[in-house]
Amino acid sequence: MLDILYQDDYLIAINKPHGLLVHRSSIAADAEEFALQLLRDQIGKKVNPAHRIDRKTGGVLLFAFDKQTEIAMQQAFMENRVSKKYLAIVRGYTPDELEIDYPLRKENGTLQDALTRFTTLKRAELDVPLGKHPTSRYSLVQATPQTGRMHQLRKHFAHIFHPIIGDRTHGCNKQNKLFKDRWEMETTLLHAEELSFTHPINGSEIVTINAPLQPGFLQAMAIMGW
C-alpha cells in the first residue's frame, strides 16, 4: 500500500518509495510495478502524474484526478511556481550554503539555465578508510532547485564534487561500492521532502505537502549518527 500524504477532489500525493517508477517506460523494461498503476488500483480511481521524480528518488509525488488539474499543475511546475525541497546525503563536507548556477545540457544538446540553492544541515566523519583517505566524510543537505531540469540535483552536486551517495549515473563509484559492500545499501540518498504551491483550482489555498523519510534514508542517517 502506498503512503498517501494528501488528497482532495482534484489532487492526490504519495510518498513514493525509492526504486519505484512513476509509470511504464520503455527505458526500464525490467520494472513490473509502477506508482501510477499501484495508486489507481489502491484508490479505485484514475490518476495522472502532475510531475515526475526519478525512479531512484523517494518522496512527494503528485497526481491529478482530471485533465484540467493535470495541465494546470504541469504548467505551474514548468513556470517554477512550485516550491520544492529535497534532502540528500552527499560525499564530503559541503559549504554551509551555496548557490549552484550551472547550465545543463538537454538530450538534444541544447543548454538550459539551471540553478540550485542548498544549505548544509549536518556533517559526519566516519572511521571508515576509503582510497587514500583514513576516514570518510559526508554531509546532509537541504536543496531547493530553482529550475526543474532533468537530473538537476544529481548533476549539480556531482559538478561541485559532492556527489549524492547511491547515484550510479552521476555519483562516486567508490562510495557506492562502499555502501553496498559494508552496509548492503544501494539506495540513492535523495528524498523529495516537500512541495508547496497555490491550489490550481481554487487559486487561493496554499498547499504544502511533506513526506517523511523512508527506511533506506533513515538507515543512512543512523550510520552517520544523525
Image (cartoon, grey):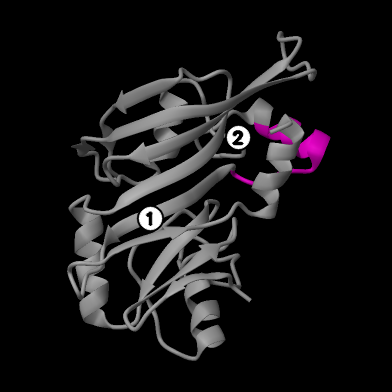
Q: Which residue is mark 2?
A: 165
| Disc assigned to residue 195 | 1
Does label 1 or label 2 sit earlier along the sequence? 2
Q: Amino acid at mark 1?
A: Leu
Looking at the image, which is closer to me, 221 or 164? Answer: 221
Instruction: Provide the major secondary structure of the magenta segment.
Output: helix
Q: Quadrant of the C terminus?
A: top right
| 61 over 88 or under it: above or below | below
Please say whether residue 177 is one of the residues in the magenta stretch: yes
Q: Secondary structure at mark 2?
A: loop
Residue found at x 43% / y 52%: 194
Please say whether residue 187 is one of the residues in the magenta stretch: yes
Q: Quadrant of residue 68?
A: bottom left
Residue found at x 57% / y 63%: 20
Residue found at x 68% / y 38%: 221
Q: Quadrant of residue 224?
A: top right
